[in-house]
Amino acid sequence: VTADRRSAAIVGLGLIGGSLARDLAARGIRVLGFDNDPATLSAATAAGVVPLDATLAGVDEADVVIVATPVSAIGSVLGTIAPMIGRASLVTDVGSTKRSANAAAAALGGGIGERFVGSHPMAGDHRTGWSAARRDLFAGADVYLCPTETTSAQTLERARGFWSELEARPRIITAEEHDALMARASHLPHVASAAIALALETAGVNVSQLGSGGRDVVRIAGGSADLWADIAIENGDELLRALAGVPGELERFREALAARDRDQLRALFARARQWVNPDARA
Amino acid sequence: VTADRRSAAIVGLGLIGGSLARDLAARGIRVLGFDNDPATLSAATAAGVVPLDATLAGVDEADVVIVATPVSAIGSVLGTIAPMIGRASLVTDVGSTKRSANAAAAALGGGIGERFVGSHPMAGDHRTGWSAARRDLFAGADVYLCPTETTSAQTLERARGFWSELEARPRIITAEEHDALMARASHLPHVASAAIALALETAGVNVSQLGSGGRDVVRIAGGSADLWADIAIENGDELLRALAGVPGELERFREALAARDRDQLRALFARARQWVNPDARA
């Protein structure tokens, strides 16, 4: 740290960027920020964030730069900041897919190539935007760190320290492993939740008629359509592979039910229960 | 009420029966109870429930009798208590499907025929059993009341008063309407959640790798396999009809994704979001 006071620049002040801004400010770090949405930027400014304009001039003052935009914008933001990363010892993003941002950063080369590592904090909410941002969103959460071929060892250590300071748990994996895992552990449940919501809408059910369990199942389908369309497209191949497994499992239940095969239904529910809750008795 | 102190008998002291026991005891009502599981019955006894044995002798002392067993056992329990409902002005069950219990009660005729009305409180938890039972589980919850063809008007009023006293919101519908609605609003999300859990298990994902959204989606699949096998079988026809809508919705997402059609994906996610959260901006 070369300045009197550490500083961080955050591009994109939604749920993740905004929560980072709150966490960092609470630790005495000066936060510079930008958001495309003027209302968001002004709310963040009112909360103490030093506003940047769309040129991102001033980002060179930051020790760490975090790109917290939708995944489709990360490559372009990295291109904008590449010539002015200044003294920053860490540039990272927080996107839900990692291959494309990593490829963009590695292609830029130069200082940013060495100082960039992709991050994906496994923290979120069905609510979105600055107004949903809050402190300690990352405490206890896994954060995947995905180095590129040009990331320096020092940068990786810096990223590990950055997230550990927010009480998150850094885990290092390749961008390819990350995206394949997320297609299954995150993107598949999201698409399935949205498909169930649409099936219920088509069946004439009102969301207020759901019990607590049904509400849990469709909750994440309340997330941003733009963000999720981006994520699904970015991780299309892996997500298609993951989704291919769902219809067959639904069909098992349908067959057991059509045959009124209670033992088979019970076995299917028991296997699901065991997976969801490994400590439970079946 | 004809006695010095009101009393209720509860057959089945799991999550729902146990929570009723706690709520009623807290209101000064003497609670008689039975459970097939000796450990459950002894835990309930230690908490102040007056234990009945398997013959249910003593149930005639109760002003209200609640059958809180799995749905497959309700008909048989109603048969056992029919000759000894004594002074009870209300006999009800709390099963998640209503047609079969209602048919069983109406077929018994006599006193129980008039004094029975089916109840289904829309309150639950992925945890099960006496240990998960708690006070105020029903506060603010909808409770469907399904009269049979023999239910008296007085019984229906009594049931409405019973649930209102627990701060639940009674809603009167037919057993047929209830079961069709639940197939969609409750049983479909449960089966879909279990199918997603099995797809994730098959894909080699560990539940600890899910984010908060993914965990929400599979949470109810952690519920009792026995209970849900019963419910699914009981409501088989309606559930099969409801489930038939899901593969087509998944296929819409798959097609949009295969075509990398961002606009179509966004439209699908936006429609799901709008249904889940009618007050949100798309």
Image (cartoon, coloured by chain):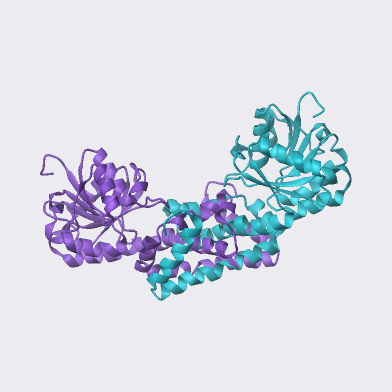
Chain colours: A cyan, B purple
Of all residues, the one furthest to the bottom in this rendering is A259
Residue B240 placement, left or right of A231: left
Q: Residue furthest top?
A: A4
Residue A268 vs residue B105, the one in the foreground? A268
Numbered marks: total: 0
**Percent of width and height locating residue A157:** 76, 41
**Which residue corresponds to the image point at 23% horizontal and 42% vertical from the top-left?**
B48
Placement of B254 over or under B154, stated as above or below: below
Q: Position of residue B256 (x, y in %)?
A: 66, 65
Residue B172: percent from left, percent from top: 30, 55
Q: Is residue A204 visible?
A: no
Q: Position of residue B273 (x, y in %)?
A: 56, 53
Instruction: Report whether residue A26 is seen.
Output: yes
Q: Quadrant of the C terminus of chain A?
A: bottom left
Q: B111 and B264: which one is in front?
A: B111
| Residue B183: quarter of image | bottom left
Position of A216 with respect to B102 (left or right) is: right
Q: Of B224 and A81, which appears nearest the observer?
A: B224
Image quadrant where one finds the N terminus of chain A: top right
